[in-house]
Image (cartoon, rainbow, N blue to C red):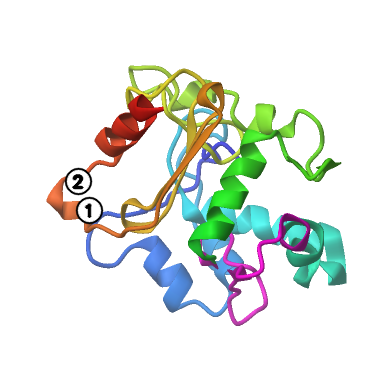
Amino acid sequence: MAMSGGLQWNEDEGLVTDPGRMEFLASDAAAYAISRPLARPPGTKFHYSSGEAVLLTRLWMNAVGEAARTYPQDRLFKPLGMQSTVLESDPSGTFLGEGFLFANTHDWARFGEFLRLGGAWNGQQLLPVGFVDYMTSPSPVSDEGHGPVYGRGQIWLAKGQQTGLPDGAFMLEGHLRQVIAVIPSRKLVILRMGMTREDVGYSWAKLLRAITAAF
């Protein structure tokens, strides 16, 4: 869950990447991911890998069994009121857990607020008590010189990325600079749905700092 599984994985270098092959060419995303060799011992180095997220999804679906197909809607999205949410799967039936989760602006904001509230919604604890704290606890092997950039539960940490956001802030980062920033100390959730090409040097950090300062 901390992107330190050790898979040999090319996330974004070159025209044809491992995510591209896994998501658009392979009929079984988990089988493609597990076919990749180990590049290093697990737990020793941070290396962002959407293949590891798919493997986690497949392990979870195997454990839950037949109920896995409707479990996210029944146990999470419906209780949160996230009525627009669509989670896509590959041809084999495995959810593409590294992405391909679609929702409108209001529903993504709900999800950010849900995490800010520690996994509770309308008085109901949907995640185990303390699980969001675990998600956002630093993964030491992700320290790139300014502190860990990643948490233990697939969450980006603002402090390690030197965003200038208050301590304790964390983010879900989407495709092409989409982001949900959760800033518990300010009781604030900031959502950017806009998509910006990654080769133009855009950073959402300045925008998030300006909004945070306004509050």
Residue 102: where, in percent of width, then height? 53, 67
Q: Which mark is residue 202?
A: 2
**Magenta stretch mostly in which secondary structure?**
loop
Residue under circle 1? 198
Q: Nearer the viewer, residue 78 or 10?
A: 78
Residue 105: where, in percent of width, then height? 49, 60
Residue 90: where, in percent of width, then height? 58, 76
Q: Which residue is located at x 33 percent, y 17 percent?
A: 145
Question: On the picture, is 157 further left or further right than 120?
Answer: left
- The amino acid on which the numbered mark 2 sits, given as a three-letter code, is Tyr
Q: Are marks 1 and 2 in contact (CB under 8 Å)?
A: yes
- The count of marks equals 2
Residue 58: where, in percent of width, then height? 69, 61
Q: Which residues are magenta?
A: 77-101
| Residue 98 visible in the picture | no
Give the structural element (helix, strand or loop) at label 2. Answer: loop
Q: Which residue is located at x 34 percent, y 25 percent?
A: 213
Q: Which residue is located at x 56 percent, y 41 percent?
A: 154
